[in-house]
Amino acid sequence: MTPTRLRPVDQLIAAADRALRTLASDPQATRASPANALSKDGAASLSERERREAAALMRVNHVGEVCAQAMYDAQALAATEPELREKFVSAAQEEADHLAWTRQRIHQLGGRTSLLNPLWYAGAFAIGTAAARMGDRVSLGFLAETERQVERHLQSHLERLPAADLESRAIVAQMKHEEAQHADSAVDRGAATLPYPARLAMRLAARLMTKTAHYL
């Protein structure tokens, strides 16, 4: 049965509610964190320097998930096809688990989430809206390119996280796998290939975000 589309005002209210939940609440995952399968808290075996670095890297990953929630919500609001809208909603729900996992791990490491999360959310929502208004194929292309870049970014974190921090590494590895699935799914649905200048701009914006979120 095809889901009934909400009225525009109801969609905006729902989007505002999700924004508040993302920014102001303690998100609850629908799936257990990959770190839960491990027998001990690796934070206890980390040096202070390693712990701070791991917390900073997981903060960057958490910001990425804040942005993912914003972009998917914006793209779902602007999607013209109900099936595509449901895809964005479904992807956002899976990313919400990543949001909860990274937040939990940051706290276990004694760190904090980014002070600029409202700014990251607003910027990502605006970018997602702009991409969606260019049409569904472009919106899917934006999703695919974003997920490919996130996948590479997560791989770099696997190389940078302390070897003893098995919990953070397990979370990042699972996230990387699922981001690749999202990208592949978007391509299968006919995602447009974005022009090189657009891909470059996305990389530069992501680099600015990750550098800033590492400290703030």
Image (spheres, rainbow, N blue to C red):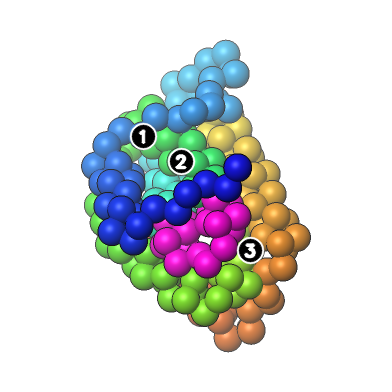
Residue range highlighted in magenta = 71-88
Give me the residue at 30% from left, 63% from top. Answer: 122
Q: Nearer the viewer, residue 200 or 180?
A: 180
Which residue is nearer to you in this view: 194 or 208? 194
* Depicted 124 relative to depicted 49: above or below: below
- Residue 144 is labelled as 3
For residue 189, which numbered disc appears in the image?
Answer: none
Residue 79, how many percent across, how many down? 51, 65
**CB contact under 8 Å: marks 2 and 3:** no
Above or below, comparing residue 100 to residue 10 in the picture: above
Q: Are marks 1 and 2 in contact (CB under 8 Å)?
A: yes
Quarter of the figure with the N terminus: top right
Residue 99: horizontal and vertical position, in percent?
Answer: 43, 41
Mark 3 crowd level (few <14, some 14–19, many ≥20, 10 Å Cα): many
Q: Residues within 10 Å of mark 1 (few under 14, many from 20)?
A: some
Q: Is residue 74 magenta?
A: yes
The prevailing secondary structure element of the residues shown in magenta is helix
The span from disc 3 to disc 1 (Cα, nearest Å) is 25 Å
Element under disc 1? loop
Disc 1 and disc 2: Cα gap in Å? 7 Å
Horizontally, residue 126 falls left or right of residue 197, namely left
Q: At x 37% / y 64%, what residue is drawn?
A: 125
Type of the residue with mark 2: Ala
Q: Mark 1 belongs to which amino acid? A: Pro
> Which amino acid does the dot numbered 3 rest on?
Ala
Residue placed under numbered mark 2 in the picture: 96
According to the picture, the residue beneath numbered tag 1 turns out to be 27
